[in-house]
Amino acid sequence: MKYVLLFAGNMSAEDRARDPELAAQYERTSKWFAEHMQSGKIVGGEELKGPETATTVRFHGGKPMLIDGPFIEAKEIIGGFALVDVADLDEALEMAKSWPGGNVEVRPVVDH
């Protein structure tokens, strides 16, 4: 079964450059990704640029409007995601529990 793991946090590249502890955390998350990619469980995923680079398309009166910035306003942002192919939800949750970088939202992928 496929799931998406959405990684939430508030760590930017600038933060990592200034804070050795954040840099070490980033190294741990990189290692986590490498291990799970090597095992074949991660079948896709990417780190995302910061929310300041986002553009949101909102509809007002049925017409699309472009708005700078992320769709939601929150202290934590989605910093990246992994598409995983695992046996079941329990395995996806075990992967999420081992994530060294903070909060993870686990969502099943619709199988068409």
Image: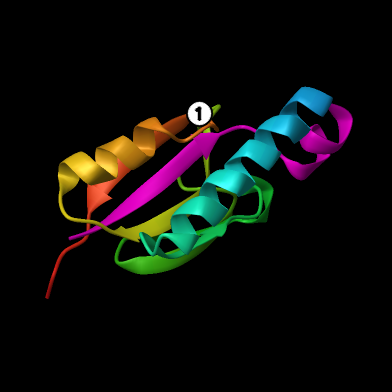
Q: Residue furthest left?
A: 112
Q: How many marks?
A: 1
Tell me the crowding category of disc 1: few under 14, some 14 to 19, or many 20 or more residues within 10 angstroms, Cα based: some
Q: Residue lying furthest right in this view?
A: 18
- On screen, residue 104 versus residue 85, left or right, reads right
Q: Percent from the top left, x then y, of residue 15?
A: 79, 33
Quadrant in which the N terminus appears: bottom left
Nearer the observer, 67 or 109: 109
Q: Is residue 84 visible?
A: yes
Is 62 placed above or below 95 here?
below
Is residue 54 rendered magenta in the image?
Answer: no
Q: Nearer the viewer, residue 37 or 67?
A: 37
Res 86 → quadrant: bottom left
Q: Which element is circle 1 on?
A: loop
> Looking at the picture, does residue 93 appear above or below residue 83?
above
Provide the residue span drawn in magenta: 1-19
- Name the kind of residue labelled 1 in the image: Gly
Instruction: Answer above or below: position of 35 versus 111.
Output: above
Does the magenta run of residues contain 15? yes
Which of the image's four quarters has the C terminus? bottom left
Residue tagged 1: 102
Residue 87 appears at what percent x and percent y?
17, 55
Q: Residue at point 36% right, 37% down?
A: 96
Relative image position of residue 59 (x, y in whole percent):
36, 61
The part of the image, by quadrant, that contains residue 101 is top right
Residue occupying the point 46% across, 47% down: 71
- 88 horizontally vs 70: left or right: left
Residue at screen point 50% across, 28% down: 102
**Taking the image as drawn, is residue 105 in sight?**
no
* x and y, in percent, of residue 40 in the image: 39, 64
Residue at 86% x, 37% y is: 17
